Image: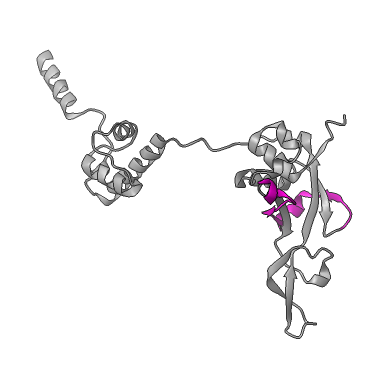
């Protein structure tokens, strides 16, 4: 039962989403690599949709559950902290998640002044009429490991070099079709070399392989007809012979 209710930090949750390995929950593994933006977005979206529950201290108050509707007023930022003795040991910084509010407040309205804003807020008591702004901070965020493990992460498929080349060819063919321009194979090669910085020729194997999978059809980029001229001639000839 203790294993099921084990609590983890938000850094460990993000590291687990990235690696899908239980090693993210042990030691300082979760803090050695910079968190990936897509993993941060996955955890943040799960918090706002209440797929995972979290507790934390809001503005240095006692720890309490963070409601799903509260997360819309906060953003997650990545910050690095140099650990003591890391430079001498040859290690890098540790990465942490800072949770701050989107709004700025006066210093008198907050207890925790650890996150100062770059903007100023209106203050009638100040001689200048403004004072430095501060963000409200949520610290010590903890969540249940079991709920994080249940998250399903959908990653975009890896784009191979061929798929990128096919996508570029389709884009050039579509542009030629819309502008009514003639796009021969040689012009297509020249455009690819200029756009991608390659050195293709009309006989290059990568280019020919991508061309077969693309929508390019020669002059003016029109889609190919279901029957070529040669097949039409054969059809006409066969009909004459049958007659």
Between 15 and 88, which is closer to the camera in this rendering?
Answer: 88
Q: Work out which residue is located at the far bottom of the displayed protein and give it.
A: 127
Relative side of 40 to 221, left or right = right
Q: Is residue 88 above or below residue 107?
A: above
Q: Work out which residue is located at the far front of the displayed protein and give it.
A: 88
Between 94 and 192, which is closer to the camera in this rendering?
Answer: 94
Residue at (23% x, 49% y) in the render: 181
Q: Work out which residue is located at the far right of the displayed protein and give it.
A: 62
Choose top left, top right, bottom left or bottom right for residue 7.
top right
Residue at (70% x, 44% y) in the render: 31
Residue 178 is at least partly visible in this image:
yes
Relative side of 169 to 128, left or right = left
Q: Magenta stretch?
A: 61-90
Relative side of 243 to 205, left or right = left
Give the percent coordinates (x, y) of residue 227.
23, 27
Residue at (37% x, 39% y) in the render: 165
Figure disc tally = 0
Relative side of 61 to 98, left or right = right
The quarter of the image holding the N terminus is top right
Q: Is residue 200 above or below residue 97?
A: above
The quarter of the image holding the C terminus is top left
Residue at (89% x, 54% y) in the render: 62
Give the percent coordinates (x, y) of residue 156.
54, 38
Residue 184 is at least partly visible in this image:
no
Q: Residue 89 lies in magenta, yes or no?
A: yes
Choose top left, top right, bottom left or bottom right for residue 107.
bottom right
Choose top left, top right, bottom left or bottom right for residue 113.
bottom right
Give the percent coordinates (x, y) of residue 236.
13, 22
Give the percent coordinates (x, y) of residue 168.
36, 43
């Amino acid at each position: 039962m203790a294993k099921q209710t084990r609590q983890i930090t938000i850094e460990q949750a993000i590291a687990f989403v990235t690696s899908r390995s239980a090693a993210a929950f042990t030691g300082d593994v979760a803090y050695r690599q910079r968190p990936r933006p897509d993993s941060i977005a996955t955890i943040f979206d799960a918090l706002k949709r209440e797929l995972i529950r979290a507790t934390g201290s809001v503005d240095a108050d006692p720890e309490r559950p963070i409601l799903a509707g509260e997360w819309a007023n906060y953003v997650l930022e990545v910050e690095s902290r140099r650990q003591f003795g890391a430079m001498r040991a040859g290690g890098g910084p540790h990465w942490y998640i800072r949770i701050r509010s989107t709004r700025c407040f006066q210093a008198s309205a907050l207890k925790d002044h650890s996150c100062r804003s770059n903007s100023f807020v209106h203050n009638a008591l100040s001689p200048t009429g403004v004072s430095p702004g501060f963000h409200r901070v949520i610290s010590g965020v903890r969540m249940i490991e079991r709920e994080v493990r249940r998250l399903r992460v959908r990653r975009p498929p890896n784009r191979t070099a061929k798929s990128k080349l096919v996508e570029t060819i389709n884009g050039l063919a579509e542009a030629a079709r819309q502008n009514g321009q003639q796009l021969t194979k040689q012009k297509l090669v020249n455009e690819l070399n200029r756009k991608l910085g390659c050195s293709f020729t009309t006989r290059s194997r990568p280019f020919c392989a991508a061309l077969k999978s693309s929508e390019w059809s020669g002059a003016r980029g029109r889609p190919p007809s279901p029957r070529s001229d040669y097949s039409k001639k054969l059809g006409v000839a066969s009909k004459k012979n049958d007659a």
